[in-house]
Amino acid sequence: MPAAIERFVRMMDRISDWVGLFAMYLIYVMIAVLIFDVVTDKFLGMTQNWVIEFAQFTLAAFYFMGGPKTLKDNDHVRMDLIYANLTERGKARVDAVTIFCLIFYLGVLLWGSVSSLVYSWETDQRLPSLWAPSLVPIKVLMVVCIVLMLLQSVALFFRHLATIRGVEIA
């Protein structure tokens, strides 16, 4: 494998690890906010209008940001009826072919998410609630994370190609 491709694969793995680690801590943010809501509501009698939507946005960010790490670590769901019995090179061949389905899907998803982001940006789209938060930040995060998933998919393709050729990218 050319050195530039190996550097790209290693860089994407590091970025995916970092983003995944950050996403992991978002769960604690969400838990803290929900506990804050319970305490202020039940013990202080103060209702917070923003808490549930903030928790929903945090959970959405968690899912978006966890995608590249899930791909990198091969922790996604897969049907293993035949795949589990293949050799490492056989698995790499199957993965190298099926990764194109994922790249196509992510490309369509990116196209739709960019369109949705542009609409939200132009119309200052907000949730119809008392808090009325803007949807632009979560849609920006969605677009960025889909791009990261696309880049991680390309890196995985190169990793599978290296495995097929009998080369290991560390």
Image (cartoon, grey):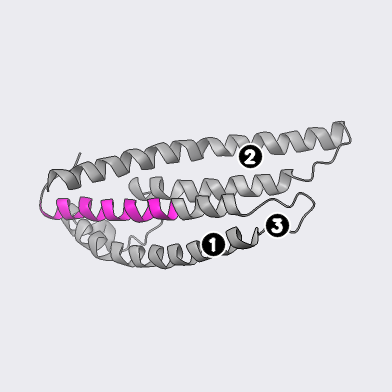
From this viewpoint, is residue 76 visible?
A: no
Left or right, 90 with respect to 23, comes to left
> Mark 2 is on which residue type?
Met
Query: Where's residue 16, x and y in %?
Result: 37, 43
Q: Mark on residue 118? A: 1
Q: Residue at (69%, 49%) from the top-left corner?
A: 53
* Of callouts 3 and 2, the N-terminal one: 2
- Tell me the magenta residue range: 145-165
Q: Is residue 163 left or right of residue 50?
A: left
Q: Nearer the viewer, mark 1 or mark 2?
A: 1
Residue ID at (33%, 51%): 152
Where residue 30 is drawn, which disc sits there?
2
Residue at image location 19% in from the left, 61% down from the top:
93
* Label 2 crowd bin: few (<14), some (14–19), many (20+), radius 10 Å: many
Tags 1 and 3 touching, CB below 8 Å: no
Q: Which mark is residue 127?
A: 3
Q: Amino acid at mark 1?
A: Val
| 26 is higher (above) or lower (below) than 92 | above
